[in-house]
Image: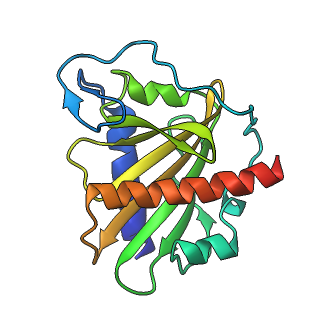
């Protein structure tokens, strides 16, 4: 089960991170338009800056929070780093159906606003998590997963991904809401650590 979930997460991450096309999203509406996005998008201001260097993402969802999002396996780091070498921590529901999971990762090499540009092939809109600006993004046509990229500092963000692998008929809206809830919880924990 964990291997199937890991492959789903890798596929979704690759689709978002490596694609580049000329579509854009109308902020707040989720509607995609044919015009290219701005090359220099801006997110709303943060309440404060949080440096993510050295954050252990396997501690960002406490056992109580893991119960809230219905995961049933211990969090663990994956062996599949992103293109910058960042590893994610996976929190999964693997013991019973439906099977799904959350991945939490720190990125200190680029800004969350990149997902609002033509550099990423994503249906994206601006949201927030724990009062911090964030980008909700998913690959076009992907209805089984959603990313939330929380901007904590210029050039840094917390990435929280929800992905469903089997047994669920979640809509895109439900998948993104689950990702937003997990991002909110992870940010609440992060704020107590920093």
Q: Nearer the viewer, residue 32 or 93?
A: 32
User: Most extreme residue toward the left, as rendered?
Assistant: 34
Left-right relation of 126 to 62: left
Q: Which quarter of the figure has residue 35?
A: top left
Q: Nearer the viewer, residue 141 or 128?
A: 128
Residue at x 53% of width, y 25% of height = 43
Please determine whether, in this image, residue 152 is positioned above or below residue 95.
Answer: above
User: Most extreme residue toward the top, as rendered?
Assistant: 39
Q: Nearer the viewer, residue 149 or 57?
A: 149
Left-right relation of 168 to 74: left
Percent position of residue 99, x then y:
38, 76
Percent position of residue 163, x then y:
38, 61
Percent position of residue 135, x then y:
46, 37
Residue at x 32% of width, y 18% of height = 37
User: Most extreme residue toward the bottom, as rendered?
Assistant: 96
Residue at x 51% of width, y 19% of height = 42
Percent position of residue 48, x then y:
74, 32
| Residue 128 visible within the image | yes
Left-right relation of 94 to 60: left
Residue at x 61% of width, y 69% of height = 75
């Amino acid at each position: 089960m964990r291997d199937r979930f890991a492959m789903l997460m890798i596929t979704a991450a690759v689709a978002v991170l490596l694609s580049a096309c000329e579509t854009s999203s109308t902020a707040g509406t989720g509607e995609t338009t044919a015009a290219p996005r701005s090359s220099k998008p801006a997110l709303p201001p943060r309440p404060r800056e949080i440096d993510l260097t050295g954050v252990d993402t396997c501690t960002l969802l406490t056992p109580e929070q893991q119960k809230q999002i219905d995961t049933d396996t211990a969090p663990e780091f994956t062996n599949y780093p992103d293109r910058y070498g960042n590893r994610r921590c996976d929190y999964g529901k693997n013991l019973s159906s439906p099977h799904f999971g959350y991945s939490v990762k720190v990125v200190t090499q680029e800004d969350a606003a990149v997902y609002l540009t033509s550099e990423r092939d994503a249906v994206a809109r601006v949201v927030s998590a724990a009062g911090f600006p964030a980008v909700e993004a998913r690959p076009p046509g992907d209805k089984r997963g959603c990313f939330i990229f929380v901007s904590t500092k210029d050039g840094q963000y917390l990435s929280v991904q929800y992905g469903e692998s089997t047994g669920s008929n979640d809509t895109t809206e439900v998948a993104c809401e689950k990702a937003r809830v997990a991002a909110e919880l992870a940010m609440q924990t992060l704020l107590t650590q920093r």
